[in-house]
Amino acid sequence: MKYVVLLIFGVLLSFSTKAQDQIKWLKFEEAIAANAQKPKMLLVDVYTDWCGWCKKMDKETFTDPRVIAYINNNFYAVKMNAEDTKRTFDFMGKEYTEAQMAAAMRVRSYPNFVVIEPKLQNIAQLPGYRAPEAFLSGLSELIEKAFKAKP
């Protein structure tokens, strides 16, 4: 009986680990639609195809299980190419390309992580490459300073 319980626990644990083995990246408009149904902060990873530090974030930071779980549980995660002038989407009654949206969010360096609060009115930025632990602490600190109510 003891082994059966351990086996069942192991199987369940493997399913929950599999469900969190990668970040659930969305397009910007998909994240906005999801936010309308269930409000949650957006985390926008603004990158370029030529950015080596962006690729390093994808390979090292965004594959860390702690980072994956934190982002999937607390955000709608978006990948946005700051140089894409072809793909368009609507946001607040205007049409944008990814490049126009990155410019509207005042992103000027890469990688850059833009956090948008659930009401879609306020943003904050966390620029630059960060290893997993530094990314998590920097993101938590940014949210605390930018979005938490002041006494």
Image (cartoon, rainbow, N blue to C red):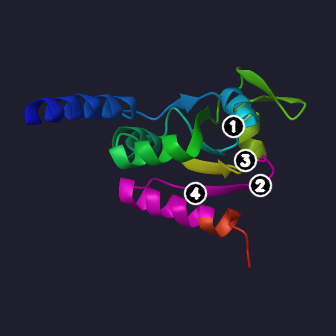
When the figure is inspected, residue 97 is found, relative to residue 62, above or below; the finding is: above
The quadrant in which the C terminus is found is: bottom right
Residue 45, percent from left and from top: 57, 42
Q: Residue at x 72, y 32 (%)?
A: 37
Give the image quarter of residue 29.
top right
Say which residue label 3 marks.
118
Query: On the picture, is 77 further left or further right than 38?
Result: left
Say which residue label 1 marks.
38
Residue extent of the magenta highlight: 119-143
Nearest the viewer among 82 and 124 is 124
Residue 94, percent from left and from top: 88, 31
The Cα atoms of the two marked residues, 4 and 2, are separated by 14 Å
Viewer-side label of 4, 1: 1
The quadrant in which the N terminus is found is: top left
Residue 56, percent from left and from top: 38, 43
Q: Amino acid at mark 1?
A: Lys
Q: Is residue 138 magenta?
A: yes
Viewer-side label of 3, 1: 1
Say which residue label 2 marks.
122
